[in-house]
Amino acid sequence: MTEIASPYISHPRIMVLGVQPGNPPFRIVKIDGAVIGEAKSFTDVLVAAAAYGIPVHDADDPEAVRWVGGDKHTWKIH
């Protein structure tokens, strides 16, 4: 397969993993590949990004944030 034929997968600095059971449910946040903590809301993700000096202008942009198992509105296990 040539490079042009392969699908492009972005590697943003922020990755938010799927919802984990808890009271309340939470999502693991990784920045630059390292686990930096848990987020219980979208605001927690923005606060974590700011603490690492990463501005998030568009959380729906896959170049900015990669959401695994949902999007910025997914905070409960279905």
Image: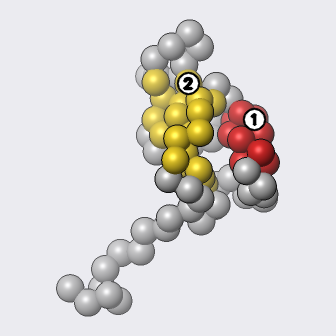
Q: Which mark is residue 6?
A: none
The residue nearer to you, when weighing 35 against 8, is 35
Residue 62 visible in the current orientation: no
Task: Tell me which residue sits at (48%, 40%) in the image.
Answer: 17
State which quadrant residue 55 falls in: bottom right
Spot occupied by residue 22 in the image (x, y as percentages of width and height): 51, 13
Earlier sequence position, callout 2 versus callout 1:
2
Mark 2 secondary-structure assignment: strand
Residue type pointed to by label 1: Thr
Residue 50 appears in the figure: yes
Q: Which residue is mark 2?
A: 26
How dense is the environment of label 2, judged by Cα within 10 Å: few (below 14), some, or many (20 and up)? many
Left or right: 50, with 36 as reference point: right
Q: Position of residue 32 (x, y in %)?
A: 56, 56
What is the quadrant of the N terminus in the image? bottom left
Label 2 vs label 1: CA separation?
12 Å
Residue neighbourhood size for the residue with mark 1, other residues' Cα within 10 Å, grouped as few (<14), some (14–19), many (≥20): few
Amino acid type, callout 2: Phe
- Image check: 5 left or right of 77? left
Label 1, on which residue? 43
Residue drawn where x is 59% and y is 29% of the image: 38
Q: Is residue 32 above or below residue 28?
A: below
Question: Residue furthest toward the top?
Answer: 23
Please state, as top left, top right, bottom left or bottom right, where the C terminus lies in the image.
Answer: top left
Q: Residue at x 43, y 68 (%)?
A: 9
On screen, residue 53 above or below 18? below
Q: Name the image colouring.
A: secondary structure
